Image (spheres, coloured by chain):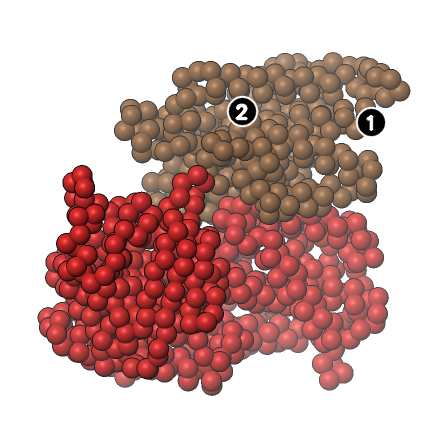
Chain colours: A brown, B red
Amino acid sequence: MISLVVTSLSQAAVLIPLVLAVSLVFRVSGVVNFGAGSFCVFAGTACASWGASNGAVGVVLTIAAGGVLGALCYAIAIVPAQRKGVPVIGLTLATLGFGLLLNFLTRTWFGGKPSIVQPWIRGSVSIGSYETSKQRLLVIGLSILLLLVMWFLFDRTLIGHNLAAVSFDHELAQVYGVRTMRFELLAWVVSGACLVIGGIFQASIASVSVDVAPTLLVLSLVGAVIGGLGSLFGAVGGAVVAGFVMTLTDQHIAAGYHLTSLLVILSLVLLVRPTGLFTFRGTAERV
Amino acid sequence: MSIIGLDKATGRKAGGASHKAGGLSQALTSAWVKHVAGPLVLVIIGLIASGNDYFVHLATAAVIAYILTAAFNIVYGYAGIFNLSIVITYGLGAFTSVYLEVQFGMPFWPALAISIAVTTALSVLVAVPTRGLNELFLAIQTLAFALALAEVTANWEKFSGGTIGIYAIPLPTLFGYELTGGYLSYYWLAAFFAWLTYELVLRIHRSAMRRKLTALREGPRVLAAVGVSPDSTRLVAFALSGALAGLAGVLFAHFQLVIDLETFSFTRLVALLLAAILGGAGYLLGPVFGVIAILLMDELSLATSQAQDLVYGVGILVLVVLTRGGIAGWLDNFMKWIARRRRPDSSESTGELELDDPGGGGDVLTETMTRNLAESVKAVHRDLRVEVRGMSVAFGGNTAVNDVSISFATGEVVGLIGPNGAGKTTLLNAITGDVRATGSIRLGDEEILGTPPQKLVQSGIGRTFQSPKIIPELTLLENVMLAGDGIGKVGWFRQSLLSPAARKQAVAGRDRAMTLLADLALADRAHSLAGDQPYGVLRLVEIARNLMLDPAFLLLDEPGAGLTEFEREEVAATVRALGARDLGVVLVDHNLPLITGACDRIYVLDHGQVIAEGPPNEVFGQQEVISAYLGVPG
């Protein structure tokens, strides 16, 4: 039981930054970032390589790189296409293109091999009869911390309110004097950083390689949709659900079928509650 | 081979444009050439490639890729469904055929047939739970489906060979002759199927099926409004693309002779998307250009030893920004531009069977128009009545229509007026099944409340919309013809294959549509895209589309809104003409002259209730009506 909870939560801890990023960009730009998986993989390998001698340096550098990459993705893939009036599906494809470029960078700079970020704290703890690494618990804690920071940023500051305004209605926000481009850029930077954090988490409790980019992409999209793509914290709820579903499947139903069970959950949710499990009246802006 | 492929299209199109509007250009662009060009090019490719193993290999890979891309083009390009699960459909086709052959010793041909049946069924299976999702959610759902199915397949080792794959793939035989993948004989097999695919797509392109699929992409409600079920059309698109993807998969497996799940991974999906969109989604030749472009990009990444990711990534980013409609779209625009420069005074025409435009000129008198239209509406004597009893519609706690009872019969024009927010459009929507309502609607003796819109159209109740719903990517003529495509006995299967019966029906529909457009003085615009037309024209086209269906009743939702005085007069004349021909017309509008001029009887709605009814002159004398309209306290 404890094993189930801890494993689920650590899965969710990796997914939380990812769904935050996906949902944020979806709300502000109306785009689903199909490059999300590649961001994670880049982060994992970059952090492992740059932080080989000093872990903290690696993490800081990688997060900074994530912000820059988010901005680049916005500038290269989104802005030119938006100016041309490309429909949403075109923008989504553009993010996929950016993801492929990132894959290329990851391969040429760091090689294509699976990478592992060395755990920041070593050792393990026992909870009852269940033993788990301290790193796993640390990642869960950090993920909750990130969630709090994001909550503060989006719910308690003017930046958050401006972002909400932009996501509700671009033109109206502009009329009220909000510089929408600037806030869209900010959303992409924050989202890039979040994706990277998710990637680092994943690499520190398991491993990442270019081949898992599609899986990470699908996990983050499905998690966000289950919870509610249109609302940040709904998406987080989806990540937790996805974490539990995957772990439950692996531990109790059939190992190696976690995508399948996620698909079942996703289909049910889209059938019964297409706005997401955790969106309620007034929180679901766009579906 | 790329040169040949490009020559095929540019040569033909340039030929069509470079000769002045004469018989030659007609002949060159005629359907006959299109039917011959496909197999001809495939034969030429085969002949050129023969003798060089590498070229044979490339050519075979290319024709198989063409089949797969054409499959995606049907579901995404034509029908607008971003179905990412197609890559696993393709894979499943490959694995199923090999499984049947290896495990059960089945010969190639029955295994091929069964595999195609399986992938068709699978594709339909994906279609069902994804109905009603918008394109982004559909993309996510189908991508998740693809990965999940890949996971299941990977776990079923007997079927997929797990992570290792399957090696011993039996060779297909034809009359005892073995066709080995990579050899010229196998190219001819693949080319034969590519020809069948091309022929099928060409027939779809020229038939009612293209109009239906385009309508599904651009406006599913229009499909329902002409009596075609959007859901079944969607299933057809999924089934067709699933079948073709499965075919491509089977051919691929026997071409490679080694398959593993990696082959049908995300990378393959990306290449497919790139080919479909780069080539030109929704264009007949889009997949051809796309496959050539991808082939060149692959060769480029091999030649420069740069990773595919880089080439594809840059390719996607550049093409999303630079091209709308891909290579085929770009060529199309280029050809139109040339044609316009050569013949600056003639408007472009896009139809395949040219018709002499009768009439012409916008100065046709309203009177004549009315008379013509009245004549072309079939005067079927029907005696039908629609009785709406105690109908209510509530949105949350807000009751938009409250216990309303109205009735209208064939041969009369009934007006429905009332201030903004009175519930007029909601009442109309409730009658046509667009919103949920309680109460009862009887058409004759039949209860029709809750009937889906397309069924209602079939039973004789047509409608127009407050803002005209027209398919912008079809011509005016095709928009009207669409209404003839859903009726009649020819089903989707024969329509897709363009059987003689389907052809006959299309020609009849075309004549009827042209007559209706001519009656509305729109004949000279018949071949222009609906998206380029002004509002007033679209309203008339919407009415013409409904008349194609020979309805007993026509419900017009604010047909005069947003029109100029002259256009409104045209609409009023049309409405009067319809009323005179035994149609029952319900007219919702604000414009009092329009209503008084056209209606026999009116209902006045306010706050969701009928506050007055009777002949216009009587009703407008009532104090309640005046105060509802002018806000004078009564």
- What amino acid is labelled 2 in the image? Ala
**Callout 2 crowding tier (Cα within 10 Å): few <14, some 14–19, many ≥20:** many
Q: Position of residue A12 (x, y in %)?
A: 67, 28
Of the pair B506 and B307, the residue shown nearer to us = B506
**Callout 1 crowding tier (Cα within 10 Å): few <14, some 14–19, many ≥20:** few
Q: Is residue B185 visible?
A: yes
Q: Which residue is mark 2?
A: A193
Q: Is residue B431 above or below residue B623?
A: below
Q: Position of residue A5 (x, y in %)?
A: 76, 26
Determine the image quadrant of residue B341.
bottom left
Chain at numbered mark 1? A
Q: Earlier in the sequence, mark 1 or mark 2?
A: 1
Chain at numbered mark 2? A
Residue in the image at 16% along x and 55% along y: B620
Of the pair B195 and B616, the residue shown nearer to us = B616
Determine the image quadrant of residue A146.
top right
Q: Position of residue A112 (x, y in %)?
A: 66, 36
Q: Secondary structure at mark 1?
A: loop
- What amino acid is labelled 1 in the image? Met
Distance of label 1 from label 2 (alpha carbons): 33 Å
Determine whether label 1 and label 2 are within 8 Å by CB: no
Q: Is residue A204 above or below residue B162?
A: above
* A102 to the left or right of B389: right
Number of numbered discs visible in the structure rendering? 2
Of the pair A144 and B271, the residue shown nearer to us = A144
Q: Which residue is mark 1?
A: A1
Residue in the image at 38% along x and 48% along y: B402
Determine the image quadrant of residue B54.
bottom right
Q: Is residue B164 visible?
A: no
